[in-house]
Amino acid sequence: MDATPFEQLANLDRLIHDPARLSILTALSACQRADFLFLQRLTGLTKGNLSSHLSKLEEARYIEIEKRFVEKKTQTLVSLSDTGRRAIGSYWDDLGQLRDSASRWQAQDVVPALV
Amino acid sequence: METRELDRIRFTTMNFGNLQGLRYLVPLGLMMLSFASWPLMVLRMVLLLGAFALMIGAGRYYRRTFGEVEKQPQPPIVSELSYSSIYNHIGPATRLQPTIPVVPRFLLLGFLALAVFVLFQFLFWPPWVVSDSGLVWTGSTATVRTFFTQSIYFLGGALFLGIGWLRGDSPSRSYPFALGILLSGLAVLAPYSVPAAAHGRMALLLCGSSMVLAGLLDHWQIVRTMGHPAGEEE
């Protein structure tokens, strides 16, 4: 039997589903790599919050972080890894399936006695 | 999070380089305006110097204020898996789509624009008449001037249409497309329907103003999407 929309919703990748991380991954999927300041301006997050989200994504191996010196300052460059690219693609697929099954879903499929 | 907002994030990231209006289109527009103001030498110099200063300073401004993005490498003339809009349904609408590199894309568009222009010109307003002795050239200095004016409009129009095409934005909401169509339309119609616009200087003025306007709109798009100040810890 197919999973209900609620089960599909529960199975969505929680790491990506967070709005801030979704914004970060959406931006990274549209470029080769971006620096920390760009992501910060784009998401409106504080440095601490952005660092925290990036750490989580790096732990999951969704992104790769590289640091370099430019004009005596550290520049942090972030790029999407192959794993991350697959994960965000799969996330959108799951969301598409969820939308389809939610539009087909009827309450009596689950609780026939109440109808 | 609204999908429209994600779409804007994606669009701004993909086009971050060419949306830097203060760096490219505004200086180019100021240069055209300086050519249009040739009798006023002081104004011309001010516009030219302003354009160069802006071109140099704006790059640093964008880098320091909004950061840097490296574009995805474009494969040479082959099909690629591209996301035309990841929100066509609710997920990514991945599909195979032919990709032509930037320079050939502009050349192709310029060539098409020129072909249409020449076709219209020769079909409807040929600078010759057919007589018993064959084709007789009826062109004059005015004809050459008109041709020059139309060429300026056409180049401006082709530039904007090329920018719209390059960005892959929807034509219905893209101001480069609107300006491109407007200028291309003036190229064809100005000498016959809008005489006030059929002067070289007016063509430079309109093209230059369009570039300044488009550059400012580009800049506004970046500021609108990335207007959040770089937040600090509370």
Image (spheres, grey):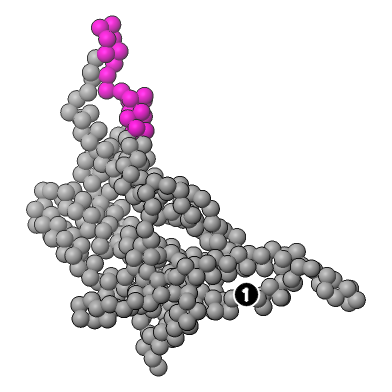
Whether residue A27 is in magenta: the answer is: no
Image position of A54 (left or right of A6) = left
Give how far across and how far down residue B227 sits, in percent. 38, 75
Give how far across and how far down residue A109 sits, in percent. 83, 70
Q: Residue at x 25, y 71 (%)?
A: B61
Instruction: Find disc 1 in the rendering and name its residue.
Output: A12
* Residue A83 appears anywhere in the view: yes
- Few, some or many residues within 10 Å of mark 1 (<14, 14–19, 20+): some
Region rendered in magenta: B115-135
Residue farthest right in this picture: A113
Give how far across and how far down residue A36 sits, in percent. 35, 78
User: SS for tag 1?
Assistant: loop
Q: Residue at x 27, y 77 (%)?
A: A68
Q: Quadrant of the N terminus of chain B?
A: bottom right
Q: Nearer the viewer, residue B177 or B60?
A: B60
Residue farthest top in this picture: B132
Q: Nearer the viewer, residue A89 or A96?
A: A89
Residue type indicated by callout 1: Leu
Give how far across and how far down residue B7 sits, in percent. 49, 65
